[in-house]
Amino acid sequence: MPIDAAKALAADPRVTDLSWDHKDIQLYHLGIGAGRPATDPAELRYTLESRLQVLPSFATVAGGGMALAGGLSAPGIEVDLAAVLHGGQTVSVHRPIPVRSTGATQTSRVAAVHDKGKAAVIVLRSDVADAEGPLWSSDAQIYVRGEGGFGGERGVAMRLELPERAPYLTVERALREDQALLYRLSGDFNPLHADPEFARRAGFDRPILHGLCTYGIALKAVVDGLLGGDAGRVRSYTTRFTGVVYPGERLRLRMWRDCPGPGRIQVSVTVPERQDAAVLADTVVEHR
């Protein structure tokens, strides 16, 4: 069924209540590879409730990822999950995310629908606040194959070239074979990441890792490597998903300080086993 962009954009915002506690935070952190080595004090700040901090990328799964699920069921939008890929993600944090919340409210809507010809890109925007005020805002760009050609605006494509100088820091992260199975327990149960038959129908040899899992892994690497392990220093985090990752592979993360300006860290994420195939591009962490 074609996307009705006008209907989707005119729909009333979807308002949902969100709640989470330390168990949700810990499960998310484990899903993006925290806790190795298990007794490392640097890892305990992600896994032990008495020392817990919250990576801002947790915003993408808070409440089970309600913004994404709600956006794909918005009026005017009816798509096949096998045709859906996450194109990009931005999270802007207004203050550190608390370890526990029972009174947060999320307001989400379709902010834009771009016509890419052979595909559509749906921009889902959500804003979350609690009794103390705004917590975070996020934009998810959802790429839907075969749904373009409806005559809408194409949208602006922003591309960020990698610096010519050597990266300030390069690290590698090994992924577990069951990384996607663990990560999906935080709420993204798209069978693309677990069901081999569904993955083949979507055009992949086997289930792929969630793009948002790679997104979280990269942010943790930046926080640990360049921000002194302090997740509260992150102001915003944006990326574009450019390639797939399979559980069991390795990620190579290269980071440049003060790029493309002061208070910004540019990141490149590739898979070294596949000739450094790019998986995250146009990736920037803004920090305090």
Image: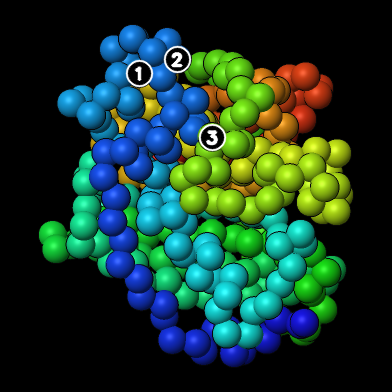
Mark 2 element type: loop
**In contact (CB < 8 Å): disc 2 and disc 3:** no
**In contact (CB < 8 Å): disc 1 and disc 2:** yes
Mark carried by residue 182: 3
Q: Is residue 66 above or below residue 187?
A: below
| Label 1 sits on residue | 43
- Locate residue 261: give its quadrant: top left
Q: Tag count in the figure?
A: 3
Judging depth in this view, the residue of 242 and 178 nearest the camera is 178
- Locate residue 131: give its quadrant: bottom left
Label 2 crowd (10 A; few <14 / some 14-19 / many >=20): few
Q: Is residue 151 left or right of residue 240?
A: right
Q: Is residue 222 left or right of residue 131?
A: right
Mark carried by residue 36: 2
Mark 3 element type: helix
Tag 1 or tag 3, which sits nearer the N-term? 1
Mark 1 element type: helix
Distance (Cα) linking label 1 and label 2: 7 Å
Q: Is residue 105 left or right of residue 75?
A: left
Q: Is residue 85 above or below residue 80?
A: above
